[in-house]
Image (cartoon, grey):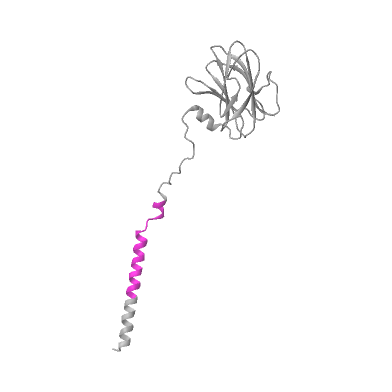
Amino acid sequence: MDPTADERLRSAVMFGAAVAVLAVGGWWWRAAAPTSAASSARPPAAEPSVEPSVSTALERALVSSEPDGSSVTFRVDPETGEVVELRRPTSLSLGAEDAPGDLPVFEGTIWRQQGELVPGQDVTRQSANDGGRYQLQYRCTRPGAMMVTSTGAEILGPSRIDCDGGATLAEVAPTGGPIRVSLSAVGDKPVDAEAQLFAAP
């Protein structure tokens, strides 16, 4: 036999064997691969929650309050710390707590509070701090006294006043975060209170 022909036959056999090995390997690879149905049956990965973790009723109320800077009224039971009442005045109709009282009306008024303070339950108004200057005016009537406290700002005026009808005007110095002003009756009798926060002229 011609040596050149023998070489050609040997090359052809080797080429055929290589093609056969590749074909068998491809078939095995496809057979061993997971099916798309099995992969789609896997449950989707859970996405991490972005909701804030809150534990108390007051924290839940603060989280759910409007972020646009509008004022919010909270009534808190000091014994349990629970939010007894939550009100948000709307821009279309002002609630009873925003009704005009005997205090003068200012152009830059942010909120007004008027109503009865029941002993043991605070009324808290919240407003955003935009870096401006503020003043707080407050008064109460009927026998008794009223306590005025704040967070997010320092009230540069008396924190306790007698309910003789006289109005107190105090500067409000923000210290950071939203401004919250709380009104509470001192003693065991309810009092009628009025307060308003407004931008200083």
Residue located at (32% from left, 78% from top): 13
Location of residue 9 by image quarter: bottom left
Residue located at (30% from left, 85% from top): 6
Count how many numbered circles sit on residues in the image: 0
Location of residue 126 by image quarter: top right
Quadrant for the C terminus in the image: top right
Q: In this view, does 24 lie above or below 8?
A: above
What stretch of residues is rendered in magenta?
Answer: 16-39
Q: Position of residue 115 (x, y in %)?
A: 62, 18
Q: Position of residue 47 (x, y in %)?
A: 45, 44
Query: In the image shown, does 45 or 128 lie closer to the viewer?
Result: 128
Is 168 within the magenta?
no
Q: Where is residue 37 in the image (x, y as percent from the top left)?
A: 41, 52
Quadrant for the N terminus in the image: bottom left
Residue located at (34% from left, 75% from top): 16
Query: In the image shown, does 25 or 88 lie closer to the viewer?
Result: 88
Q: Where is residue 130 in the image (x, y as percent from the top left)?
A: 62, 34
Q: In the orientation shown, which residue stands out farthest toward the top?
A: 143
What secondary structure is the magenta-colored segment mainly? helix
Residue located at (31% from left, 84% from top): 7
Query: In the image shown, does 118 or 18 lie closer to the viewer?
Result: 118
Q: In this view, does 201 lie above or below 78?
A: below
Q: In the orientation shown, which residue stands out farthest toward the bottom?
A: 2
Location of residue 169 by image quarter: top right
Is 34 within the magenta?
yes
Q: Can residue 29 be seen in this view?
A: yes
Query: In the image shown, does 146 or 86 lie closer to the viewer?
Result: 146
